Amino acid sequence: MPTSPAKQALHPIEASHLHARRERVFLIFAGLFLGTLTMLNILGISRFIKLASLETVDGLELTFAVAVGVLPYPITFLCTDFISEFYGRRRANFVVLVGLLLNGWVVLILWLGGVLPGFEPTDPQTGELLRDAADRLPVFFEIRALTFGAVAASMIAYLGAQLCDVYLFHFLKKLTRGKMLWVRNNGSTLISQAVDTIAVILITYWVGGLAGVIDVDRSVGPQLLLLIATGYAFKFVVALLDTIPFYFGVKFLSRYLQIDPTIEHHADREALAHDRGNDK
C-alpha cells in the first residue's frame, strides 16, 4: 500500500506532524537555554559594563556595573517559563539538570585544553607560561582562569536559582488555578533572580579570592552590595519586560502547539466538583 506524501514527510520516530511540531519548539527553547548558559560561562566576569557612577558626599565613588555574562542570563528564565508552561515541571527540571552537566563539560574542556601541550612560549627552567609586556597570559589561559574563578559560584547559583524558578512557577500556577499569567512569570523569576544574584557574586568573590584568581579586598563590602543591587536591578527590569513576549508567546503557542496550558487546572476543578457532588 503506497504511503501518503504527508506520512513520507515524517521521521519514523515522529508520531504525527503535531508531535513533531511540539518537539521542535521544545528543542528551540532548550537549545536557546543551553546555548545562552554556555555563552554565559565563557563570558562570565571577563568584562564589567559600567552603567553609571555616583560620588557620595564623603568623596567615595560608587560604580554601578554588571558583568557581561549577566546580559544574556535573563533569557534562560524566560525559556524555562515557556517550557514549564507547555511541557511541565519534569521537562523544565530535566533541561536545568542538562545545563548543570553542560557546565561540567565546559570546565572539563577548559581544563583539558590547558594541560595538553601547546605552542605557547614557556620558561625553560620552570616550564611556566611566559607573560607578555602587559603581564598577561595567553588569551586562552586568561579566559580559563576567569572561568575557573567563577565556575563554583556559577554552578551553585545556577542550580539553586533555576530549580527555584521552576518550582515557584508551578506553585504559583497551581495557586492561581492557571490564571494570572503575569503572577507566575514575574513571581518565580524575580525571586529566583535574587537567589542567583546574591549567590553568584558572594561565592565568586570569596572562592575566587581564596583561590587567588580574583584580586579582592576584604573591605569592599559596600561595593559588593552595590554589585548585587545593580545586577538584580538589571535582571528585575528585564524580568518585567519579558512579561510582554511571554504573554504573546503563550497566546501564539497555545494555538500553534494545540496545547491548553491550564488544562491540568481545569481537570483539578472538575475533579473537585465531582468529589463535592459525590459528598452530597
Image (cartoon, rainbow, N blue to C red):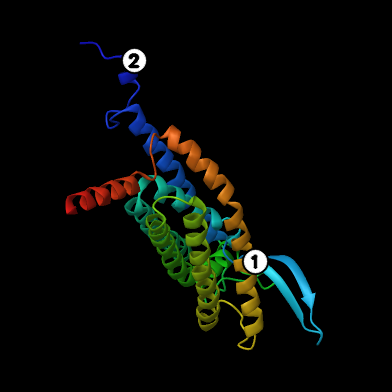
> Residue reaching furthest front?
280
Q: Secondary structure at mark 1?
A: strand
- 267 sits to left or right of 224: left
- 260 sits to left or right of 151: left
For this rendering, which residue is in front, 269 or 196?
269
- 253 sits to left or right of 265: right
What label does residue 176 carry, if any? none
- What residue did someone put label 1 on? 66
Q: Residue at x 54, y 59 (%)?
A: 40
- The image quadrant that residue 111 belongs to is bottom left
Local crowd size for mark 1, using a 10 Å CA cut-off: few (<14), some (14–19), many (≥20) = many
Q: On screen, 197 above or below 3?
A: below
* Amino acid type for the residue under numbered disc 2: Pro
Gap between marks 2 and 1 measured at Cα: 53 Å
**Residue 178 in the image: x percent, y percent?**
41, 50
For this rendering, which residue is in front, 171 or 67?
171
What label does residue 5 carry, if any? 2
- The image quadrant that residue 109 belongs to is bottom left
Q: Residue at x 65, y 83 (%)?
A: 222
**Residue 157 in the image: x percent, y percent?**
46, 69
Earlier along the polypeptide chain: callout 2 or callout 1?
2
Local crowd size for mark 2, using a 10 Å CA cut-off: few (<14), some (14–19), many (≥20) = few
Q: On screen, 190 above or below 178?
A: below
Q: Residue at x 67, y 73 (%)?
A: 135
- The image quadrant that residue 165 belongs to is bottom left
* Amino acid type for the residue under numbered disc 1: Val
**Residue 221 in the image: x percent, y percent?**
62, 84
Q: On screen, 278 above or below 134?
A: above
Q: Secondary structure at mark 2?
A: helix
| Residue 35, visible in the rendered structure | no
